Image (cartoon, rainbow, N blue to C red):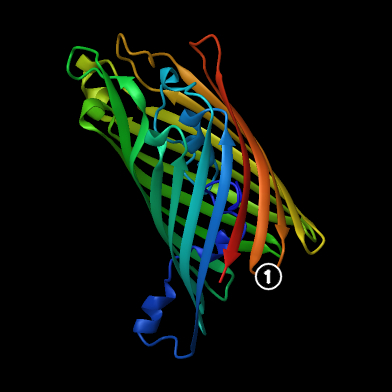
Amino acid sequence: MQNSEFGDSARIGAMRRCHFSISALLLAAGLAPSVLADWSLTTRGTLYYTSDASLFTASQRLSRDADPTQPALDTRLTGQGSDGVLETMAQVGRTLESSVGTSALDLRGDGYVFFDHADYSNGNVAVQAKHAFPSKTTAMVRFYYNPDLFLGNNLERRSGHFQIAPEQVTSSIGAMHLAQELADELELRLFARYGTRRYNQDYAERNTDFWTIGPHLDWTLLPGVTLGLAYHYEKGLAAGRHQAQYEDDVSYINNFAAADLEFELGEKFVLSFAFDYEHNDWLSHLRGDERNGAYEQIFQGEALLIYQATEALSLHTGIQHGSRKVNLEPVGVAVTNFGLGIKARF
């Protein structure tokens, strides 16, 4: 699981602020007579260098609380060269304290602006809410929307002429989890999600519906030392499995595992390490489809250092390195990202 200061997953702090307000329903029913409300605004800006602009966005979402499986990305689209990227994030939240627990509701927007490869610039919006009951049980729901993400200029098949055309995808994902504190400093969550990926007309055979399920574990091993683990099983079925004439079925089964370890170094510094692994088994049995008999493996590691200058202001820097390899191809592709940024909370 990645940290909020380095990628899209928003682990440090944001996991506690981005939540669904179940207690608002209780308030409406008059079941929580005593309520204290608090508003917050969090902003973040990070400047990145990436070795491959075509893989950068996917690398930022490869974590247990983001969108690790991503759209299918053909290898011919990678290797587009290095670039600088500016990430901006703004999040508005409201927390409600009442006799039935703590609720929070957040609206968040992220944007990535590429300096040279402007077509890859993209943005997303998410609303997430959570309620923590006095029994140490929590419930959360989230909706995430990422429109018109440019994947590259690819080879389309629908016209029958195999022309080069831009490939874009819009992702809409709903997620939820139910968590229980099993013991002091040990929490288990059951995570599930359902989503759709809708491509532009030239690649409509890739339109995919998918679902995900898996456990998450957060464990404070020692004071100031926290371990996070996750496993996801996901299945996605594409329209192309019923459209044999295009020989392009991106249906898949995905196994995803993640681990992260965080160290609090005194009162000012936090150092964390994360590792993510993904195995995609492509399900296509179409003759002529390059994914027939193929599978893909993805590895990514990261290190992040945070300096908490004040209670409301922090600085962060980090490095990520990832690689992906398809079994039917002789070599894989890799991406390395360096980031430096600032975060403020009001």
Residue 204 lies, in percent from the top left, at 23, 29
Rendered position, 331 above or below 278: above
Quadrant where the C terminus sits is bottom right
> Can residue 243 be seen in this snapshot?
yes
- The residue at 55%/57% (across/down) is 44
Q: Is residue 82 left or right of residue 308?
A: left
Viewer-proximal residue, 256 or 91? Answer: 91
Residue 197 lies, in percent from the top left, at 32, 38
- The residue at 62%/57% (across/down) is 12
**Residue located beneath label 1 in the image:** 311
Say what amino acid the circle numbered 1 marks: Glu
Rendered position, 114 above or below 251: below
- The residue at 60%/30% (across/down) is 322
Q: Residue furthest bottom?
A: 33
Rendered position, 336 above or below 154: below
Residue 333 lies, in percent from the top left, at 54, 20
Residue 76 lies, in percent from the top left, at 42, 17
> Can residue 274 be seen in this snapshot?
no
Number of marks present in the image shown: 1
Q: Is residue 342 left or right of residue 141?
A: right
- The residue at 34%/23% (across/down) is 153
Viewer-proximal residue, 156 or 20? Answer: 156
Q: Quadrant of residue 311?
A: bottom right
Rendered position, 160 above or below 196: above
Classify mark 1: helix, strand or loop: loop
Q: Residue furthest left?
A: 159
Q: Quadrant of residue 269?
A: bottom right
Within 10 Å of disc 1 (Cα), the crowding (few <14, some 14-19, many 20+) is few
